[in-house]
Structures are given as C-alpha cells and as structure tokens.
Image: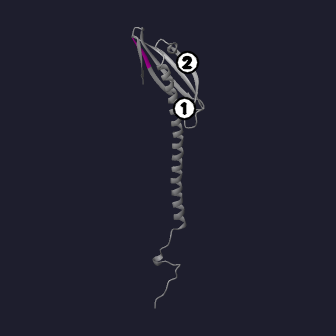
Amino acid sequence: MKIRTPKTQTANGEGGFTLIETCIAMVVMMVGGLACAALFAFSVQNNVGGSERALSMAVAQQQLEQIRSVKYEDSTLNTGTTSFSVATGGRSYSVQRVVASELNSDNTAKGLKRITITVTPQGAGPGWTRTPVVLTSYRSTLGAGSYLVTN
C-alpha cells in the first residue's frame, strides 16, 4: 500500500524562494534601477547642454559671416574689443568681438587681422558647461582682394 503525501509538501524537502532571498534580489534590482535612472538624468542634462552650445555656435558663425561680407578697410574691422547682446530663437547671447592686428618681428603691420568671437548664452540652463563658444578667424588683404581663414 502506498502512502500519499499531501500536496502542500514537496519531494526531497525542496521549496520556493525564502523571504531573505527575495529581499536580496529586490535590493540588487533596486540598485541597478537607480543606476539606470542616474544615467538617464545625466544624458538628458548633457543633451540640453549640447543644444545650447550648438545655438551659441550658430550665433558665432553668424557674426563671422557678417565680418566676411565687409571690406578689409571697413570700420567693423578696426582694432579693438566690441561687446554686445544678440537675441535669437527666444534666447539672449552675450557676444564679444576682438580684432587685433598681427605684427611682423619689427613691429610693422602684416596686413593680417586676428578676429576672435566669444559667445556666451545669458541665463543658460543646468546642462550648460559654463564655457563660452570661441571662434578665431584671420582676415588678410592681398592687393585689391581679401580672404578669410577660419579655425
């Protein structure tokens, strides 16, 4: 005659997960989930900063295009520093334009001007790295024509 075992007991003393094993598994999953959430927040912040930097770069390139359209002798290219604000795309930017004449070793003018444009967004968001966009260009005159070299 066979003895039947009740359905609540299992063969060979095997059972399911214990409460401690379940708690440990949940803690491990929680740590992994928090790490993923932190990575997601970091990537969103950097995407916002990249967008602001791209808009600042566009403003700087616009300023270089304006300088490219004037003649070498124009008052826009007088040596000195000019600071002003630009509003575009619903945002304000602080622009600083520095024009400096390059000199030969004997302190005579080369006919070459270095133009540095620095653009900083005003009221940048939390993702901004707090470093302005800086473009440097050289403007030269050769005879009657002139050209612009951009770094």
Asked if residue 140 lies in the magenta stretch, the reply is yes
* SS at badge 1: loop
Question: Residue 104, relative to residue 61: is it above or below?
Answer: above
The residue under label 2 is 82
Nearer-N-terminus badge (1/2): 2
Evaluate if marks 1 and 2 touch, with contact meaning CB atoms under 8 Å apart: no
Question: Residue 20, relative to residue 124: is it above or below?
Answer: below
Query: Residue 120: horizontal and vertical position, in percent?
Result: 55, 28
Relative depth, front residue between 20 and 67:
67
User: Which residue occupies 51% across, 23% down?
Assistant: 63
User: Which residue occupies 47% across, 25% down?
Assistant: 135
Q: Taken as a whole, is the magenta stretch helix, strand or loop?
A: strand
Query: Residue 91: horizontal and vertical position, in percent?
Result: 59, 31
| Comparing labels 1 and 2, the label whose residue is closer to the camera | 2
Residue 121 image-quadrant placement: top right
Q: Amino acid at mark 2?
A: Thr
Q: CA distance from mark 1 to mark 2?
A: 21 Å
Relative depth, front residue between 36 and 11:
36
For the question of whether residue 119 can be seen, the reply is: yes
* SS at badge 2: strand
User: Which residue occupies 51% across, 43% down?
Assistant: 43
User: Which residue occupies 54% across, 55% down?
Assistant: 30
Q: Is residue 148 left or right of residue 6?
A: left
The residue under label 1 is 130
Number of labels in the image equals 2
Q: Quadrant of the C terminus?
A: top left
Query: Residue 142: horizontal and vertical position, in percent?
Result: 39, 12
Q: Is residue 110 left or right of residue 84?
A: left
Q: Specify the segment rendered in magenta.
A: 138-142
